[in-house]
Amino acid sequence: MEEGHAEGVSWRLGQRGERGTVRMGRSAIKRVCKKVSKKEPASPSKTPAGKNKDPSPDPAPHHTFTSEETETLRKELLTWYDRCKRDLPWRRLAAAEMDANRRAYSVWVSEVMLQQTQVSTVIDYYTKWMKTWPTVEDLAAASLEEVNEKWSGLGYYSRGRRLQEGAQKVVRDLGGQMPRTAEALQKLLPGVGRYTAGAVASISYGQVTGVVDGNVIRVLCRLRRIGADCTSPPVADALWNLANDLVDPDRPGDFNQAMMELGATVCTPKRALCGECPLQSLCRAYKKVELESASSIRNLVDRRADAPIGSDIEDCAATASCSLCMQPSDRWDGSLGVANYPRKSAKKPAREEQTVTCVWERPGEQGAAEYLLLQRPQKGLLAGMWEFPSMLLEKACTMKEREDILCGRLQEVSGCEVSVKDLQFVGEVIHIFSHINQTYLVYFLHGIAMKEAERSALRWVTRRQFMESAIPTAMKKILQLCDGQRMLCGGAEPPRKRKKDRSDGQRDSKQRSIDSFFRK
């Protein structure tokens, strides 16, 4: 924070670019305060007798762009993007690929992977995926098992399955040709929504259509001070209309990527770098921060209790009834700055679940330890992936009850008798899914022989095979827990503590202190 004085009154303001706040010099303060003072205080509207009161002005212009603003936004944003865009593998591939069909496939893969996942995480997965399946035909020919193995650890596993289903449909029903418009992509490919369809069509085929993802929502809500719940239908419709109106007709793909890039790197959720934003002059949230700061300073300078507090000269004319404005009940938080936008409704809390699971280990034929894995059903959470034998607890259970449930599950899958006394409790592993807080109660079982049976949904794997299989992240955490407890024969050897070399004439300090006590 920087400290200064204005006519003998101390004031503090944040540095420009930090949390969306601004630093203002003395002359700037006077200019803004003068500007605020010229604004008349809010008062009830007066209507001459005998005349009807004019209806409230349409609030839409406050939340849209003029033609001049639109041209400025396109120019400034694309200039910034050409200078500052990150070097990412999917961008390089899309720029270099001359075949539109292969380009569309590569963009499609990247957009699906980037949903709910950070760029830094996706880069390695994307590179390996495209190396394994460089064309839509290659992906269509892969097995679901192979797809799950490549997706393992990326989360939201249904995305990988839908990608493969979409590739198979392109090859089987569309002659290997990707749909070429956003409308066709959304209609024909499973799992492709409005955003993904718009991104693929604009980047791959140059269709003039906008996109709206989390980054674009944040940028647009701040630019036009859209403070209503961004998940509400009126706001969603308004954001899509804005995105489609703003997209540059000559460079639609670059424009859409630039909007997303701005939200990801500059107009970030909590600490927006307003001082680096190419659209600062168009941002009404930024102007709101300036005016709020100036009003506070003026009140300190004037020290007049009855001094009217100016309001934003660009306030929506019908805030109380506008479906896009922040409502009076939603208080402005000055410490957040531009991060007051966008607003979301309270997220539904994740449900709590408990699952008993068992790491069953046996000696392998080559001496290496092996672990029993079962394949999950082909539909639902973690569909088709492999896990240790597990059972979801439908209700709160005592330790004895959950151990009986686990033994029953193990006997069901193995065909052999498993006793509670054979189980050893290891600990708990907590894993957070998007809508579930899952607690795994982990047990260990070693050495019991089971009846071998030909079952496609059951397999014994070595540690190396385990790490290469389509394994959920939670199962890897469970194996690490057993490693940490030194339970696994196939795990790392525990470090041996070096024993102190004591001769017959040496005794430790505790023994010497006892001898000294009796000699007194």
Image (cartoon, rainbow, N blue to C red):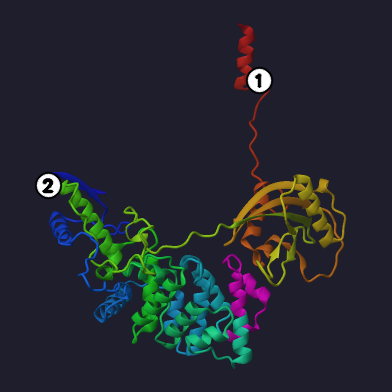
Q: Residue at x 30, y 56 (%)?
A: 18
Image point (28%, 57%), residue name = 21
Type of the residue with mark 1 = Gly
Identify the amino acid type marked 2.
Answer: Glu
How many circles with numbers are drawn on the protein?
2
Q: Which residues are magenta?
A: 136-164
- The residue carrying mark 1 is 505
Q: Is residue 454 left or right of residue 487?
A: right
Residue 5 visible (yes or no) = no
Q: Is residue 499 above or below residue 48?
A: above
- Label 1: which secondary element: loop
**Which residue, given by chain and number where applicable, does mark 2 sit on?**
7
From the top left corner, tell me how far across and down residue 260 is, in percent: 40, 72
**Looking at the rendered structure, which numbered label has been put on residue 85?**
none
* Residue 35 lies in quadrant: bottom left
Residue 426: x and y, percent? Answer: 70, 47
154 falls in the magenta region: yes
**Considering depth in this image, is 204 or 448 the residue closer to the camera?**
204
- Find the residue positioned furthest to the bottom: 175
